[in-house]
Image (cartoon, grey):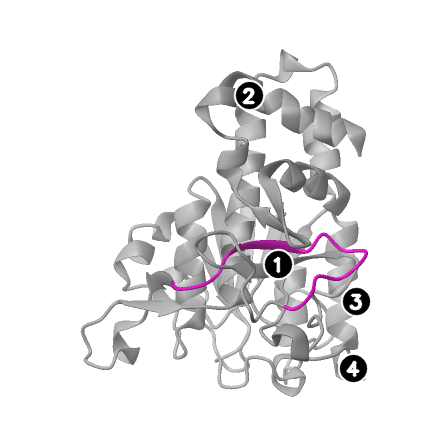
Amino acid sequence: MKVALFDTGLDPTDAVIRRQLGRITYKSFIPGEESHTAKDAKDENGHGTHCAALLLKVAKNSEVYIGRVTMGKKLESPEYISQVRPRPSPIESLPGTNLRQAIEWAISEGVNLISMSFGFPRYTQALTDIQSSILSAYQSGIIIFAAASNGGGNSGLAYPANQNEVICIGASDGKGNKSDFTPGPYPDISNYTTLGEGVTSSWPKALSQTGQERTKIMSGTSVATPIAVGIAAMVVDFLRQIPRDVDQNFEFLVEKQLRSKKGMNAVLKRLTEERDGFMYIAPWILFCDDRKEGVAQVLLDALRSC
């Protein structure tokens, strides 16, 4: 199982991340940077480190691909993330954008899921290349998750979370209730939420106020997104480990249906509870002792029905 996360990079000296370097593939898409190994990674912002550690904790058996697409000072600026590089990308013959190159890299590496904990206020001409790469990933069978936005009722869904090819993730508090800053709910999308308030995760030592703290508590749909992606990866990993002969259509259901947004939605909905128009992702709803023997069949039936 291969999962990609695009953000501000990561701090390889962090204890959580350092123990997991063996399953991390890292590449910087910042113009002028040549660091392409996890041990040489950097993160001057902290956001990427926080998200990466969460993903690593939840998706325990996945290979994780970290793409550094921004240094973070302008995390949501189309003009920065869509900045054209001054020389051709190693992936394509013509110069591309930071994020576009990262998505194309994920496609070439056979990634299954992509986590994007950022968004743009609206789709503009500056994002055309990014949209093209999102469509390419979708057509390649990659499932993309993106943060809804933190504007609550004062703003709509961010791009690309508002696209049909992307699964939109909102945040909830520790009791599963929608966070005030999560926009929606909206018609025609699944309106997923999962934990995104008061979440403790890794933080670069260099950014701590005293130079000692290695964790930080953060809230936002950007925090919920890697957790949701980690849950999705966990479910895929679970299904891939069960005996193939449990269902005569196993290969089609798991290797074909589950690699589509429609199939992933069908599976995720078996792990959710409806809360005020939102679908709160809580895997223990299905993965509990009472249903231990029938979990695989419930998920396979969900895939069969889509």
Location of residue 219 by image quarter: bottom left
| Sequence-wise first label, 1 or 2 | 1
Give the left or right position of residue 165, taking residue 147 as reference.
right
Helix, strand or loop status at disc 2 = loop
Pick whichever, 99 or 274, lies toward us: 274
**What SS does tag 1 mark?**
strand
**Kind of residue at disc 4:** Thr
Q: Amino acid at mark 3?
A: Ser
The quarter in which the C terminus is drawn is: top right
Question: 10 Å neighbourhood of mark 1: few (<14), some, or many (≥20)?
Answer: many
Q: Is residue 241 visible?
A: yes
> Upstream in the sequence, badge 1 or badge 4?
4
Could you give the CA–CA distance between mark 4 and mark 2, rounded to whole angstroms?
44 Å
Task: Say how many tags the image has.
Answer: 4
Residues under numbered marks 1 and 2 in contact, where contact means CB atoms less than 8 Å apart? no
Front residue of 254/183: it is 183
Marks 4 and 2, the one that precedes in the sequence? 4
Q: Which label sits on residue 124? A: 4
From the top left corner, tell me how far across and down residue 246 is, in percent.
63, 13
In the rendered structure, the answer to whether residue 118 lies left or right of residue 36 reads right
Q: Is residue 120 visible?
A: no
Q: Quickly name the residue at label 1.
A: 169
Say which residue appears at 53% left-offset and 35% top-offset: 285
Asked if residue 91 is positioned above or below residue 70 in the image, the reply reads above
Q: Main secondary structure of the magenta part?
A: loop
Secondary structure of residue under mark 4: loop
Q: Which residues are magenta?
A: 183-198
Alpha carbon separation for disc pair 1 and 2 = 28 Å
Closer to the observer: label 1 or label 2? Answer: 1
